[in-house]
Amino acid sequence: MPRYRSSGPSLPRRTLDYLQHGAAEGMRNAELFDATCQFRDAGHPLEDVEEQLLARAMADGLAEAEARHAIRSAYARTSREPVCAAMASPAPVAGQPRRPAPATAKLERAVMVVPAPVDDGFVRLIDACFLPDEFVSIAPSTETEDGEIVPRRGVTLTAAEWKSKVAAKGGIDRVFGTKLGLFIRINPMCKDGATNEEVAAFRHVLVEFDRDEVGNLIPKEEQYHAVMASGMPVSALIDSGNKSLHAWIRVDAPDEAEYKRRVAIIWEWFSGINLDKLNRNASRLSRCPDGWRTVDGDLRRQRLLALGIGAGSWTAWEAEQATPDEGALMPISQLAAYDTTCDPNNILGKRWLCRGGSLVVVGQSGIGKSSLCMQLMILWALGIPAFNITPVTPLRSVLIQAENDVGDLAEMYQGVRRGMGITPEQEAILNERIFIYRDTTRTGAEFVDAASALVDRHKPDLVWADPLLNYIGDEISEQRVISDFCCKLLNAVSLRTGVVWCLLHHTGKPSKDPKAASHWTASDLAYSGLGSSALVNWARETAVLVRIKMPDGAPPTFQLSMTKRRTRAGMVDSTGTPTDTIFVRHSQHGGICWEQCESPDPAVEANPNRYKMGRKSGFDPVAFKGVIDAHGGSLTKVNVDEVAAKSKCSPRTAWNWWKQLKNNDL
């Protein structure tokens, strides 16, 4: 396909490369949308470019209708300032989420005033970027025989020990008297560590640039603006004492693999600004605030300029980088043609849970939610229905939990294995489809960061977090907290990966009023979990497991209800009737395992419209017919109030009973 040539505004190199070479499978929609946005931003009318963009997309294998929808969706949005071709982003890194054009590229050398230096910068940096017992490596510079100034390996002390030394000596420049330059490693290290293998926490990435792609010096005002425009979380901004600013981007990666992924995203974002290519490693040295360096015979001080700017966390920043599909136009014609009976996003039941969805499992403390979770993971990993909830295909799960140690988890697994009759061959399959981790310390954005890394590593369909209260990291009764954690952070991962979040949650304290829940319907049960109702609104499904009252001597029995998507789950009662509520018990055959049982009250199960915890209907057909016969033989607008009063119900209920009476031909 020939390159696009235009007499209008220029297009970025990335767009021209796409038109010439196309996009790989998995990136075809994304690349088409990005290219269309560049045409739109450059002022090209839709009618002038649609045919060529369609040809490119169809050559890559997209259907014409799908490609045309993506193109017109892009043109339906507000145009941005065009991206200069010289500053355009390269193609996305393989396997990384697509990102919008870097903010720095769109602002075309805009400037901001650089902040004034911060007093006592070294101590402030240590407090902001390291924990007291973490080892911090500081390296003074030395001059080689060839006259080259290079940093030494460095000295590692804990952050608390460095602060004590500085307090005793009167400054870090008095601890190290060198005027050739003083460096500090951006991440905590092992004791005496200096290499990438000796990094103790993958917390920061160093961003540094002083010249553009053609070698021109970039003023510090423009460097500062580029960092600020990115919106990335910056733990510290340091003036090197020469040409560049050093920005410590806080990524909080759980491991080296995820660190490299986040480094790649940062390099893609700043691709038009020529980042220092040597700064990708985690043990990187940065200029140490309050140290001195000599430049062309001039003695200059390295200074801390700012702390804690930009997004609150890496996860929060990633959540802001919405993909074009989020919020995209969905025309009526597309909805009319969508085959809901064969939805490719469905993974469980009858579109009960689809990719990117969410499930909250609510239950009283200590009744066995964790063992239920284990059982669901195992059965669905084998492609086997659980309580008739059928997976479309065998599902992979990641479980992150805080309440159970390895012995507890072993008991749960072995109990389910015994109860379900899991074979050694099936167990080998489970080893490749279920991944269990214990995390008792991370909360909020830090937890989602770690979970996101596990999603990238294992590619699961479901991620289970047990319990939610351990991981939300703030007051769960606040709508703001639910919005930030679920809608912003968890949804960002779901949109990027299609994973379904499954959160295990506790009910609140039982009411002192024994009749408090006597009138609850299945919908009311959805709100039995602790905290803001925003959690229920966020979840695609809320499943409630509650112990019910039984006669003395009867085995403990529990009610499992689906409160939102209900019969879509596919559950059936003991008579084979589709239902939103079943009754379950702990296995009577040994081991920790759940089994479905009959309803404790067969009369309840015989009524397909019942909810176990719902208000019992007062409808007595014979008595109501007697009232109707006494008032003319039919219900009318004239007699409805009298009939309702005699029947001790509301007029609206009277009309409902009248319909039932006629349907029963009484």
Image (spheres, rainbow, N blue to C red):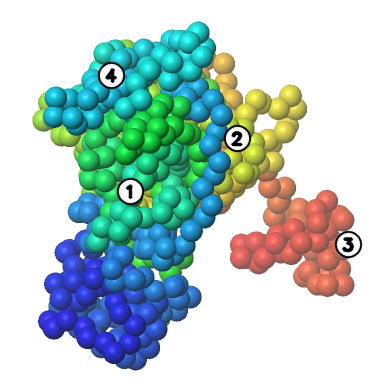
Q: What is the number of the mark on residue 476?
A: 2
Disc 4 crowd rating (10 Å Cα; few below 14, some 14-19, many 20+) is many
Please, what secondary structure does the residue beneath circle 2 have?
loop
Please, what secondary structure does the residue beneath circle 1 have?
loop
Please, what secondary structure does the residue beneath circle 3 have?
helix
User: Measured along the vertical axis of the image, is residue 637 above or below residue 591?
Assistant: below
Marks 4/2: CA–CA distance: 45 Å
Q: What is the number of the mark on residue 642?
A: 3
Kindly identify the residue that appears in the image at 71 percent across and 51 percent down: 620
| Residue under label 1 | 209
Marks 3/4: CA–CA distance: 92 Å
Disc 3 crowd rating (10 Å Cα; few below 14, some 14-19, many 20+) is some
Are the two marked residues, 1 and 2, in contact with CB atoms closer than 8 angstroms? no
Going by the numbered disc 3, the residue's amino acid type is: Glu
Q: Position of residue 558 (x, y in %)?
A: 49, 29
Kindly identify the residue that appears in the image at 43 percent across and 20 percent down: 173
User: Measured along the vertical axis of the image, is residue 241 above or below residue 140?
Assistant: below
